[in-house]
């Protein structure tokens, strides 16, 4: 856990006041670790007869073949009722399904029980989502994750860094950046505030702030490294030579078991072997679940025959192996940063009492909701124009 502490640290809920519950799909088949399976599943749905189509959908109270909903922001998916749907599958989009588990989603509002359109409206190349975990004091794992993808993982709240597309209007308490500028002697960027928060946030949501420029710079540098590893954009992360994981024995076509040999630092996927795998990567947990085990289960767990979820690759794709090697690397490198987090000591604290005295906290109620007006037209049910 980070060494930065203070009893009067402001909570994340006040520093980044707008939050949204993660989208709830309501059925498993519209997400998959590979995009091709989603296209095949969609085709099977729209080619099925009426009775079979209803069963394949896996209807809920929120979504049936006859539910009328508008198009998702961004113009993806149709708006006619699924009972009459035809045509090609909407292009799948990359999403974060679970901690460090990037998968694909069919972006069609008719398939998603609770899509949270306000999140889709601000999802673009500039956006970064902070996602709270269920970490509690004394438990392993980060209290906060960050991603550039639309996050589906539960149960934590999702806090977009920006309230509008294009990186406009940071989701920070009004006046916070100005107050930090006075304390630090320079104006921090919104992404710097998020980086600092990643490095120091404690389970429960407290975010100790520092007005010391040197301490702030070290925390931001550490948080920027964490951001890079969590978002996995740009140059791919690598472990030092001799510590990089490799496939030592080919993975089978359909591995069903995952085991770890701690002494040999080897990950076994049936008879397939990957090593070296640091024990810290194997032991990395979020919300009390080993990340590597959860990632593997999403790709190897058996699906019920006759369901759309049963449509999947005939054999383990090479891309999954590459993703697994990178995931091991990311988890190991994140663990390597924990000593630096513990050594980061608070100086010149910016307390919640100070921010209340300056009128920064509590944030106004309007800051806790989405931006009221967005410059986009959205299609409503059956092709009608939706009004924002």
Image (cartoon, helix red, strand yellow):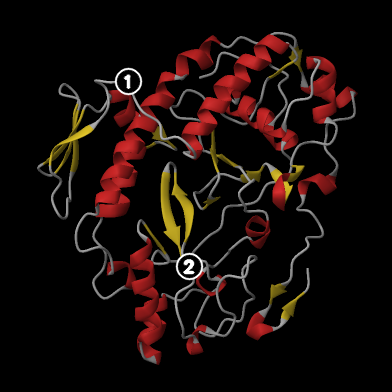
Of the pair 91 and 175, the residue shown nearer to us: 91
* Residue 240 disc label: 1
Q: Do the residues bearing badges 1 and 2 touch, measured as CB atoms within 8 Å? A: no
Q: Position of residue 297 (x, y in %)?
A: 29, 49
Q: Position of residue 49 (x, y in %)?
A: 36, 91
Categorize mark 1 by other alpha carbons within 10 Å: few (<14), some (14-19), many (20+): few
User: Which residue is the extreme one toward the front?
Assistant: 235
- In the rendered image, which quarter contains the C terminus? bottom right
Residue at the (46%, 18%) spot, across then down = 338
* Residue 115 quadrant: bottom right
Categorize mark 2 by other alpha carbons within 10 Å: few (<14), some (14-19), many (20+): some
Disc on the earlier residue, 1 or 2: 2
Secondary-structure class at tag 2: loop
Q: Is residue 93 left or right of residue 272?
A: right
* Residue 172 quadrant: top right
Residue 79 in view in this figure:
yes
Residue 143 in view in this figure:
no
Q: Is residue 11 left or right of residue 292?
A: right
- Determine whether 32 is above or below 263 in the image: below
Find the distance from the CA under tag 1 to the CA under tag 2: 37 Å
Q: Position of residue 73 (x, y in %)?
A: 65, 66
- Determine whether 225 is above or below 302 in the image: above
- Determine whether 248 is above or below 114 in the image: above
Residue at the (78%, 23%) spot, across then down = 352
Residue at the (26%, 68%) spot, across then down = 304
Q: Which residue is mark 2?
A: 91
- Determine whether 152 is above or below 238 in the image: below
Secondary-structure class at tag 1: loop
């Amino acid at each position: 856990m980070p060494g930065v502490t203070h009893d009067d640290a402001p909570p994340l809920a006040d520093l980044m006041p707008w939050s949204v519950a993660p989208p709830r799909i309501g059925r498993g088949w519209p997400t998959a670790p590979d995009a091709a399976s989603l296209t095949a599943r969609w085709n099977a749905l729209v080619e099925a007869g009426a009775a079979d189509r209803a069963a394949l959908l896996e209807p809920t109270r929120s979504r049936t073949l006859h539910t009328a909903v508008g198009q998702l922001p961004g113009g993806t998916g149709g708006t006619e009722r699924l009972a009459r749907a035809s045509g090609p599958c909407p292009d799948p989009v990359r999403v974060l399904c679970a901690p460090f588990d990037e998968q694909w989603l069919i972006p069609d509002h008719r398939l998603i029980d609770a899509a949270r359109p306000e999140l889709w409206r601000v999802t673009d190349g500039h956006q970064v989502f902070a996602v709270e975990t269920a970490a509690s004091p004394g438990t392993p794992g980060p209290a906060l994750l960050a991603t550039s993808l639309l996050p589906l993982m539960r149960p934590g709240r999702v806090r977009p860094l920006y309230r509008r597309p294009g990186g406009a209007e940071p989701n920070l308490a009004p006046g916070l950046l100005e107050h930090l500028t006075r304390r630090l002697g320079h104006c921090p960027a919104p992404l710097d505030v998020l980086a600092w928060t990643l490095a120091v946030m404690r389970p429960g949501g407290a975010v100790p702030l520092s007005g010391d420029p040197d301490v702030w710079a070290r925390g931001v540098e550490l948080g920027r490294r964490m951001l890079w590893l969590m978002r996995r954009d740009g140059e791919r992360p690598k472990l030092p030579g001799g510590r990089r994981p490799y496939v030592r024995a080919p993975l089978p076509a359909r591995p069903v078991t995952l085991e770890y040999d701690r002494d040999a630092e080897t990950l076994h996927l049936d008879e397939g072997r990957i090593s070296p795998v640091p024990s810290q990567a194997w032991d990395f947990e979020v919300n009390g679940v080993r990340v590597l085990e959860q990632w593997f289960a999403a790709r190897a767990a058996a699906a019920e025959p006759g369901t759309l979820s049963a449509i999947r690759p005939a054999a383990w794709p090479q891309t999954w192996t590459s993703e697994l090697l990178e995931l091991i690397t990311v988890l190991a490198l994140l663990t390597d940063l924990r000593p630096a987090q513990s050594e980061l000591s608070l100086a010149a604290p910016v307390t919640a009492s100070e921010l209340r005295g300056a009128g920064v906290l509590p944030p106004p109620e309007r800051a806790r909701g989405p931006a009221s007006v967005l410059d986009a037209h959205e299609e409503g049910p059956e092709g009608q124009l939706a009004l924002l």
